[in-house]
Amino acid sequence: MKSERFNFPGALGHDLAGRLDLPDDGHIIDFVVFAHGFSIGKNFKPLHTIAKALVDEGYAMLRFDFTGLGGSGGDFSDTNFSTNVQEIKSAAAYLEKHYRAPGILIGHSFGGTAALQAAQDLPSVSAVATIGSPCSTTHIVHNFGDKLEEIIESGQAEVMLGGRPFVIKNQFLDDIKKHDVAQGLGDLNRALLIFHSPQDSVVNIDNAGHIFRFARHPKSFVSLDGADHLLLKNDDDADYIGRVLTAWAHRYVRGNSDKASTNA
């Protein structure tokens, strides 16, 4: 696959680093936006594996770093669920302006929760897939552990996420309380595919059950038996997700192929 790298504006006014992976022959079935998990970034290895599986089947996938992560500007501590949702929509707007509006959203973990929210404001999107995603925005709080009280009392605290320190501010806690993703699922009106591992120790599989229950058909669930939350235990897990995604997405793509422009 070939790739193009570019910047586009984020929710807080900083440039976001984007990467668009394209089929070698330039013929595109549909465009996909992938939202990475909390504090991870677009270059996370399993995301690359999933992207390759889709691109090999004719999809173009846009991955990007949320504000303050990877190659994107800004301060991660100023971000929240609302900014994540807005930046997914900004990524979709970039594709619409330079290529074609995306038909598919995919999100891992907290990025999947944000994708569910963003899809409701993106009429071009016909299908959404989540991977190990929480059913509510407040689920993320358990990652802050004994720092939660410090965040509330002092306004911010340094929290270890994936072995790296990040500053979390009270504004993040205030923002996640404003969103009821489960309530919006009934009005999603998009095809939905839920991937989740029964052994996920970060986001319990009960979250997948809640998403499935609240969403309307067409909806599907795929068990990632034996997989860990970050899909790092076995390289085959990410490859499996990618292959299942391509088969599922073909039912919901818009059907016409485009010749990709390389003049964006």
Image (spheres, rainbow, N blue to C red):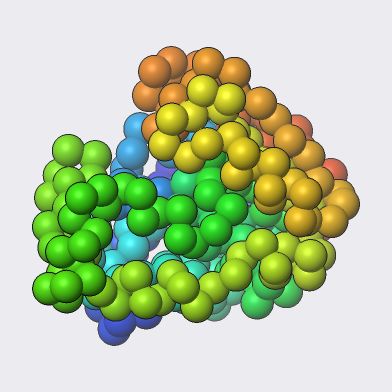
- What residue lies at 33% left-to-right and 63% top-to-bottom? 66
Along the line of sight, the residue nearer the viewer: 105 or 185: 185
83 versus 26 height, above or below: below
Is residue 190 something one can see in this rendering?
yes
Judge left or right: residue 187 versus residue 11.
right
68 vs 240: above or below: below
Quarter of the figure with the C terminus: bottom left
How many numbered tags mark residues here? 0
- Residue closer to the observer: 119 or 51: 119
147 or 56: nearer the viewer: 147
- Residue sitting nearer the eye, 212 or 108: 212
Q: Position of residue 124 (x, y in %)?
A: 71, 69
Rendered location of residue 88, percent (x, y): 49, 67
* Residue at the extreme right: 217
Rendered location of residue 262, percent (x, y)? 47, 60
| Residue 30 x/y as whole percent | 68, 53
Instruction: Please state if 252 lies on the left or on the right of 11 as rendered.
Output: right
Considering only vertical position in the picture, is 115 above or below 23?
below
The residue located at (17%, 38%) in the rendering is 163
Q: Residue at x 24, y 59 (%)?
A: 148
Q: Quadrant of residue 166?
A: bottom left
Residue 43 image-quadrant placement: top left
Q: Is residue 62 visible?
A: no
Instruction: Give the residue drawn at x 53%, y 49%.
Output: 134
